[in-house]
Amino acid sequence: MIAKGKNICWENYQKEIADDHFYFARSCIRQNFFPASETFFLKILKDILHKDIFDDPNQTTCTGIAYHSGIVPMETTMTVVARQFALMNEAGYGNFVCSCVTSFGIYSEMVETWKHFPELEKKTRKMLKESTGKDFVIPKNLVHTSDIIYKFRKEISEKAKYRLVNKLTGQPLKIVDHIGCHYAKIFPEKGIGGAEYPYVLAGMIDDWGGAQVDYPERRHCCGFGFRQYLVQSNRGYSVSNSKRKLDSMKPYNPDAIITNCPGCNFFLDRWQYVISEMEGTTYAQNNYGIPVLTYEELAGLVLGYAPWELGLQLHQVAVEPLLDKIGIGYDAKEKYKGANGENIGEPISASVLKNN
Amino acid sequence: MTKDSLLKKLSEDIRYQEGLTACINCGTCTAICPAAQFYDYDPRMVADTLQHKDEAELEALLKGDTIWMCGECLSCKTRCPRSNVPGYLIQALRALSIETGFFAESEKGRQQLAIKRTVGEHILQYGYCVHIDEVNTQMYPEQGPVWDWLKLNRETILKKLGANYNENGAGTLRKTSDESMNDLRNIFRVTGAIERFDKIEKYSEKKASELGIQFSEGKDNDYFRYVYSNEKPEEQ
């Protein structure tokens, strides 16, 4: 009954997500640390869902990391956002989709600011014209990439090769969802399910056969904290907050974590490695950690794409235990090969955490 | 800037206008705050201090470590029963602290130079806040052995993963076009980002001189290491 009631609450927090014709904006972090994720997002939209999405070579950062670490004025971020919208207009699109939760917060914040302070929209137009000669129209629809995967999760499920089910026991795999603060904490009405019951990733887990893990620190920050990670001497903040989440979820024995935000994916993966080096402990049995996947990687896996094409070898926490549970076949020898199958060596082993 | 203009200057920032209504000191923001769980930091006190509208208290905030402890997760925005946003107040305070040069008076404030010389300069060089060529396990050891392996073999691994590394056109990790870079640099000039960068550099150089720490461009100097990893020159 409780779960049923929560589902009703979630249904009350839906948002408009366009059906087709998207302008795609890349993420600073995702393309560096999980470089296949955006490629597979585009591939899934084009090849599986047959949607039109434009990957513009002229786009840039939204400056979100610089803005939230205090090194650029709000006017700079507003104008860069305005340029991205101008590029979208020039390409003939009206639906803007960004591949980063921080960016989603930034784009939403700037559009909201212009609504409440029209003089700032006017000022932004003037600054954009002066610096680039461009003008812009605010998007008809502004969403995060995961919103689109969520919208088409049932279609993905119908085409899936695998379910998030333990092939030996037949039980649903226990999947932790991590939404990322700026998806719905700044503007709860702009996130599916709001800030209280965000359903954007939980919906994928439910429809792809897994079971959600409801643990005490489910809504806690991953610990990025912008300047709290960017400056080396502040990183205790970052690892401590990740540890708080990981300690809280551990008793529920999750089979995997999926994340919405590229930064969160990085921190929940890499801080497990650091904690294992610092304390000699891991978050799963036999010196394995809890695999941390982007939603594109998870969608790619259930659709049957090969793990090493999806870039899962670039995670510090090994994904093999998850692949084995689902029953996804893989060639262990191919994991660390180059583009032409050439031998390029392997990462050195961590002290405790297993590589594969 | 005269002392009594600090409050006026702060009140011009829309993040101050949007972030402070009337704080009832309930402490909900502090209860939910990841920074408060790690640092001796209390967002409730930041909001309360500002509503005193006291110039001396404001100046102390601008010169101290406190305003640099927030992680800007904005969990406080969701929870405040009176629609205050301590995270927005922090953004306005940080901007004013840089504007006045007060950031250089605190250990955490001085770290802004490290962020300007990494994230800030990456944007103007690559078009993105982060770039694989600039991330190594000396500066970012938590990246782990898998990153060393990727860095060493990045041409072939990124090709395998469908990226367009350092090439023209669209795609993951492509080279940002000259035209886009020109637009970005012009925007930074017109909107005050370059001016802010220059202020961070100017006040940092002055502080380095006061502290007797060697200061030069880039990351290979004593002052950068001091603000980035808190290494004192005698330890370097």
Image (cartoon, coloured by chain):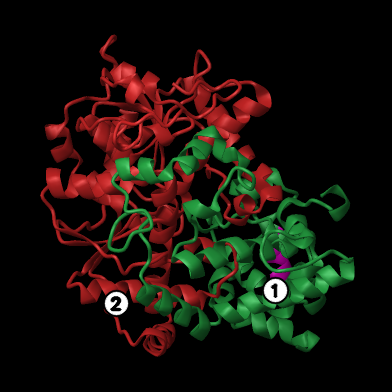
Left or right position of A268 against B57: left
Which chain letter goes with mark 1?
B
- Return the residue nearer the eye: A198 or A40: A40
Specify the amino acid type for callout 1: Glu
Q: Colour of chain A?
A: red
- Which range is magenta? B45-51
Q: Amino acid at mark 2?
A: Ala
What is the letter of the green chain?
A: B
Number of the label disc, if any, that sits on residue A149: none
Q: CA distance from mark 1 to mark 2?
A: 32 Å
Q: Could you tell me which secondary element the residue under label 1 belongs to?
A: helix
Q: Position of residue B97 (x, y in %)?
A: 70, 73
Give x and y (percent) for residue B50.
70, 71
The residue furthest top is A168
Callout 2 crowding tier (Cα within 10 Å): few <14, some 14–19, many ≥20: many
Tell me: A103 left or right of B191.
Answer: left
Q: On the image, which quarter does residue B171 sit in?
A: bottom left
Magenta stretch secondary structure, dominant: helix
What residue appears at the point 57 percent right and 45 percent down from the top-left corner? A223
For label 2, the residue is A86
* Residue A315 visible in rendering: yes
Is residue B84 visible to the viewer in this orientation of the structure?
no
Pinpoint residue A170: horizontal percent, then vertical percent: 25, 13
The residue indicated by pointer 1 is: B201
